[in-house]
Image (tube, grey):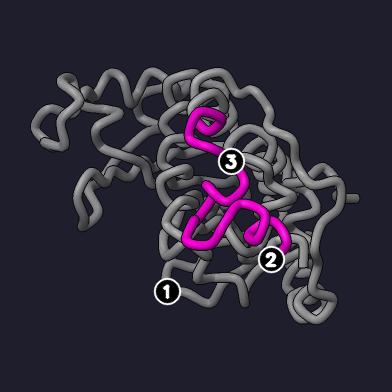
Amino acid sequence: MEAQKTRKATGAGTTGLRQFLGLEQQQAWLESGSEPPDADERVESTELRFKYLPRYHKLRALPQAKEVLELLGIYGRDCLPMPRRTERYWWSVSCLPSTSDKPLVRVNASWMELFTLYADGDGVRGRFILHLSDFTSDGSVTPEQLDEHLVEQGALAPEDVGWFFPNGADMFGIKVRGAASLHKMLASPHLLRAIRRFNLTHMNRGRNAYQASHSYSVADHMLDQGG
């Protein structure tokens, strides 16, 4: 497999995204979005594609489908480094996963949720998991230092945004209501950098634990191959 060949070329003992992308290259992508060379082709499991195809068709029939797939297209383009080369093994997307919160789609890396979209009536709402230190006034991991204005300014209106503090050091969750605010937040320079930094952290922790639930049909839209 391509991933195995790359691992041999970069040397044993290297883990996570560092197998493909050096720390300086990661920093350049984080700060400027400079695109590192991606794989020309995807390494695909036909078995997994067909396993989750019924869920994809069910998603496409929902009133939220267009917005969900457009938002994922932005996320795949702007928030994941080398998305073809790292697909499934370093990040994955689940379609209508069977969890109690009933998401429409969820993007994961390592053991961590990155980005989730839910139905909100006929519309959508979303959830990002990020580093708290990107949103505190002093760069600390102290919840009391949260800069609320910094969190809210990316959305269309402050009432579209909420937040929570997941268990774990330097963890912060942002909840966003409405496709318009989600689009605006994904275009916010500060939030985009925070998303990239959190994603790099977890893609560097090693192989994705959710490989078996990857929906290639949904990922097509993240990689600009969707119909």
Regarding mark 2 in the picture, which secondary structure is present there? helix
- Amino acid on which disc 2 is placed: Gln
- Amino acid on which disc 3 is placed: Leu
Q: Which residue is drawn at 21% across and 55% down?
A: 168
Magenta segment boundaries in residue numbering: 5-26
- Amino acid on which disc 1 is placed: Ser
**In whole angstroms, how far apart are the C-alphas of marks 1 and 3?**
36 Å
Q: Which residue is drawn at 64% across and 22% down?
A: 34
Mark closer to the chain start, 2 or 1: 2
Residue 19 lies left or right of residue 5; in this view the side is left
How would you rate the neighbour count of disc 1 (Cα within 10 Å): few for under 14, some for 14-19, many for 20 or more? few
* Position above or below: 150 against 42: above
User: Which residue has dot 2 on it?
Assistant: 4
Q: Residue at x 27, y 28 (%)?
A: 135
Q: Is residue 76 magenta?
A: no
How would you rate the neighbour count of disc 2 (Cα within 10 Å): few for under 14, some for 14-19, many for 20 or more? few
**In whole angstroms, how far apart are the C-alphas of marks 2 and 1?**
35 Å
Mark closer to the chain start, 2 or 3: 2
Where in the figure is residue 65, as x and y percent of width and height? 72, 52
The overriding secondary structure of the stretch rendered in magenta is helix
* Position above or below: 36 against 103: above
**In whole angstroms, how far apart are the C-alphas of marks 2 and 3?**
15 Å
User: Which residue has dot 1 on it?
Assistant: 100
Where in the figure is residue 64, as x and y percent of width and height? 68, 51
Residue 63 lies left or right of residue 11; in this view the side is right
Where in the figure is residue 56, as x and y percent of width and height? 76, 67
Of residues 30 and 177, which is closer to you in this image?
Answer: 30
Q: Does the magenta stretch include residue 11?
A: yes
Of residues 204 and 197, which is closer to you in this image?
Answer: 204
User: Which residue has dot 3 on it?
Assistant: 21
